[in-house]
Image (cartoon, helix red, strand yellow):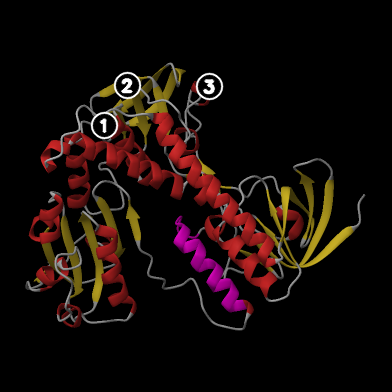
Amino acid sequence: MPDIENYDVLVIGSGEAGKYLAWTMAGEGHRTAVVERKLVGGSCPNIACLPSKNIIHSAKVRSLAGRAAEFGVDTGPAATSMSGVQDRKRAMVDGLRQVHLDRYRASGAELIMGQARFTAPRTVEVDLAGGGSRQISGTRVFLNLGTRATVPDLPGLAAAGPMTHVELLDLDRLPEHLVVMGGGFVGLELAQAMRRFGARVTVIERGAQLAGGEDPDVAAAVLDLFRDDGIDVLLRTRVRGAEGKSGHEVRVLTDGPDGDGAVTGTDLLVAAGRTPNTGGIGLEQAGIERTGAGYIKVDEHLATTADRVWAMGECAGSPQFTHVAFDDFRVVLDHLHGGTRATTGRLVPFCMFLDPELARVGCNETEARRRGLGYRLLTLPMAAVLRTRTLSEPRGFLKMLIAADSDEILGFTAFGAEASELMAAVQVAMVGRMPYPALRAAIFTHPTAAEGLTVLLAGTPVPQAPGPPD
């Protein structure tokens, strides 16, 4: 049995929160070790957020190439080279990986590649990637374990060898007919990208709408977009199982409004949620408790049930966004320095990187009604935002919720060109608790997407009748 090596700080997982905590603590003079199983920097720069947005942008360029004549450009027929798409993505990933390695060297934090497993409180055994093992303990331990794509336990599904986003985003060929199981973030973004590259695409969603957490009018607009793109969408349809082999021919068995059915395609993408990476690493040996769903139990400062152990990011049940994981790092660091920053009451924005984008911050109408919040509503079609006329991208609309009894902004949704940047302007106003008339008085550059707020806020907020969620 090797001797136990003692560190001031031990971080398990080098994702967004873990890497920033390690770099910061090492920079403050703490002896710091980071154990990473596979992906230096976590999933975001390697297989998820940034690679997917890289490929989604390639799909947008492919779409624009097909519309070239609309912009007065004569290009001839456009075609997709998936090897070229992947070359661009892989060059980006290689560059990001090197940035992370350079940062580790500069910070002084020791990066250890291997699989960690707790053997005692704040002590792990690491099976090293290159062979052998090490026993490591930390005065303070931080868990950044992440999540993985869930493949439901359905008859024949695992045997069919379906892809998750990991495999699809590394595919050097274009599927002839991609069947997508799930109508959430991952399924929708990748379905549209593959369709725009030239694949036939079918989306199967068990709920009544796509983008299940959004208002019905937003979901209907996304559905219209998909239908205009030539994507087949099956709603209220449950997957019963699968037959065949993804990559050749796969038959997805369904139960929908018209009874039992099947969709036959060449490839299957499962985008059915996430599972926390908290099993099989001996958390019980360290006194670290989990929730019924398998996430690590934490308080508002992300402290676990074990002394001097914190969990951050998706494994702690935080909203599954890289920007939230980064804020988890800030919460923990502030707590370590005696501050009071907490995860409660955070204003979390998001963007679904469709084309055009869907972005939201704060409440939508469905949430406001569920919470019994009175509100007034401002709406504006994106065609009224002059920036969209210059881009020939008039699809979509803006929605802002204003409190019924004050001028507080409760939430904002944008579905349209450059929606994420427009949403950020409203988010800043909400963080500063700026009443909406003060935002209305601002001067926005012409012609930008943000200028649309001038037009939106010039209207009169319409009171909404209280009632149950739609």
Q: Please, is residue 20 above or below residue 383 in the view?
A: below
332 sits to left or right of 463: right
Residue 12 location, quadrant: bottom right
Give residue 234's mark: 1
> Which span of residues is magenta-colored?
318-335
Asked whether disc 1 touches disc 2, contact meaning CB atoms under 8 Å apart, the reply is yes
Residue at point 20%, 69% (across, down): 401
The three-letter code of the residue at mark 2 reads Val
> Which SS type dominates the magenta stretch?
helix
Q: Is residue 322 magenta?
A: yes
Pointer 2 residue: 263
The three-letter code of the residue at mark 1 reads Leu
Within 10 angstroms of label 3, few (less than 14), some, or many (20 or more) residues?
few
**Distance from label 1 to label 2 (Cα)?**
10 Å
**Which secondary structure lies at badge 2?**
strand
Residue 136 in view here: yes
**Residue 79 % position (x, y):** 29, 27
